[in-house]
Amino acid sequence: MTVAEYIVEHLINIGVTDLFGIPGGVVLDFLYAAEARKPVITPHLTYHEQTAGFAACGYAQSSGKLGVAYATKGPGFTNLLTPMADAYYDSIPVLFITSHSSAPSPKGIRTMTDQEMDTCDVVRSFTKYAVRIDTIEDVVPQVSKACLAAIGGRKGPVFVDVNTKLWNEPLPVGSFRAVATEEMLDMSMDDTISQIRAAKRPVILIGDGINQADARNDFRELSKKLNLPIVSSRFTHDIVGYMPNYYGYVGSHGIRCANFILSKADLIIALGNRLNFPVHSPSYEPIVKQAKIIRYEIDETELLRDIPNSQPYVTDIQHLIKKLVTNNYDFGDHSEWMRTCDYLYEELKNEDCPDVVLSLASLLHHISEESILVTDIGNNEFWVSRACVLNRQKNRTLYSKSFCALGNGLGKAIGAYYATRKPVVCFIGDQGLQMNIQELQFISQHQLPIAIVVLNNKTSGMIKDRELATGHTTPLHTTSDSGYLAPDLDKLANAYGIQYLHFRELPENKTVLSKIASLLLIELPVDPNLSLSPSLPKQNVCQNLTPYLDSEKYNYLDQL
């Protein structure tokens, strides 16, 4: 077995079914080894290495398995850096593979060999593990170690740079050994249970760590047992968004009801949520002063984040949630608190729903529960999130959370399809579409069941609002009269052989509505003057969002 064949077999053995990339001279042997194992594992040609990386991210996010992207050296490698950073910021397990043919330049010499560089030095700050493999003895232990690092503990990207001379070298007999994983720390839940019993207004605050721990289904079972309110980060509304004790996502553009509930809590149980709030700000300091906070983290370095009034535990929340599900713990009676939460929900559920949110909500009603939703970066993602909560949507929804990589949507949609073989609906703005527009060819060429919904305000809306908010009197490079333009989407779809529909045509087109997640490009026009709301001014407490509620109504709800 050659090195290339071994790596392919190793990926197959850990459940990888699809790879994404663009061929280049130094990775051809790896690519041919993967091609030889079709259909067990399939390499896919994207039209830009950045999209290959995002596809691997979408594959991993939607399936929980290891995503894999490959590229040639030099510019192929550097084109992987943005999705690599996206995977690091959002803790997505992805293996990025490239190859080299000579040593990097000695210190002090800019270039010795074209396209060669110290790749590991470049990526070390935003990968969990980065290794350059130059000897046959290092292949098995280093590849195994990299894959285990990606999927173990707090997940994230890893990088392997293989000497191209090794691909066709035979592995020595007896080199197939495993790398041991570290055991997770055990923890006691007695403190947590007693704190919940004693609290009058406890809240469960969830985050993407539940997805990363593959604990979605177990947490849903737990939610049925808990007579407690659940709120979330914006990116995890899909975990229990359809359950009656879920009240929305919190934050500076959050759901008002959720922010009100968080502001009233005397105990916050954070599960898979980093509590990445400005805790010493006027908006959130009152919360951490009045509420005891119990934090569960798999990554103990997160405990360096200063959260006042908190009790941290380092553990794998998958084990924690399983234990809570399988044992009949008495969490106490919080029925009065739940009635308050229900009242807040009824009073506020229809706030902050502009026409674009209502349009998205009507569209989402026609999407099957099995379809995967993907959003790009920009105002579009906030409107989609709001529509999902309004609808109590069940669909798995993928975001670029912390790194906020504009243009990630099409790539993640491609990866999500190959990971799940389910239809995908990709929501994207007109600017994000143009970042990786070439992948319309991939989607069309392979006839993937991906519906692309372009929220088209013909502006760079989020940046335009930032320009005006920071004191500039006129937009620059964000509107049609200041340098930014969007293409004719009807003509664009026709050029790529994709069916185009204007949103106004949908109500009459029952055939399309019955299979919304097919190969389509749907244009949803948005008022270019529509700004993102709600919004939390820096000096306000977290429940006092703009546009402001009627003062009498606000004061009454605030005093509940």
Image (spheres, rainbow, N blue to C red):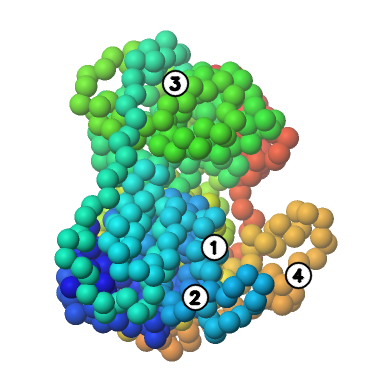
Near-viewer residue (45 or 195): 45
Pointer 1 and pointer 2: residues touching (CB < 8 Å)? Answer: no
Callout 3 amino acid? Pro
Q: Amino acid at mark 4?
A: Leu
Give the mark nearest the N terminus, 2 or 4: 2
Q: Separation of disc 3 and disc 1 at Cα?
A: 46 Å
**Residue denoted by label 4:** 476
Q: Secondary structure at mark 3?
A: strand
Residue neighbourhood size for the residue with mark 3, other residues' Cα within 10 Å, grouped as few (<14), some (14–19), many (≥20):
many
* x, y percent for residue 271: 41, 33
Label located before the other in sequence (3 or 1): 1
Give the mark, 2 or 3, whose residue is nearer the N terminus. 2
Give the quadrant of the N terminus.
bottom left
The reply, left or right, for residue 146 in relation to residue 484 is left
Amino acid under label 2? Ala
In the image, taking residue 474 as reference, residue 538 lies left or right, namely left
Mark 4 or 1: the one toward you: 1
- Mark closer to the observer (1, 2): 2
Element assignment for label 2: loop
- Disc 2 from disc 4: Cα separation: 45 Å
Q: Provide the residue designation for mark 3.
A: 202
Q: Is residue 303 visible?
A: yes
Badge 4: few (under 14), some or many (20 or more) residues near its Cα, within 10 Å?
Answer: some
Residue at image mark 1:
121
Would you say residue 428 is visible in this rendering? no
Q: Position of residue 309 (x, y in %)?
A: 56, 20
Find disc 2 in the rendering and name its residue. 103
Indicate the secondary structure of the residue bearing disc 1: helix
The tag earlier along the polypeptide, 4 or 1, is 1
Residue in the image at 58% along x and 18% along y? 290
Disc 4/disc 1 C-alpha distance (Å): 37 Å
Mark 1–mark 2 distance (CA, rounded to whole Å):
13 Å
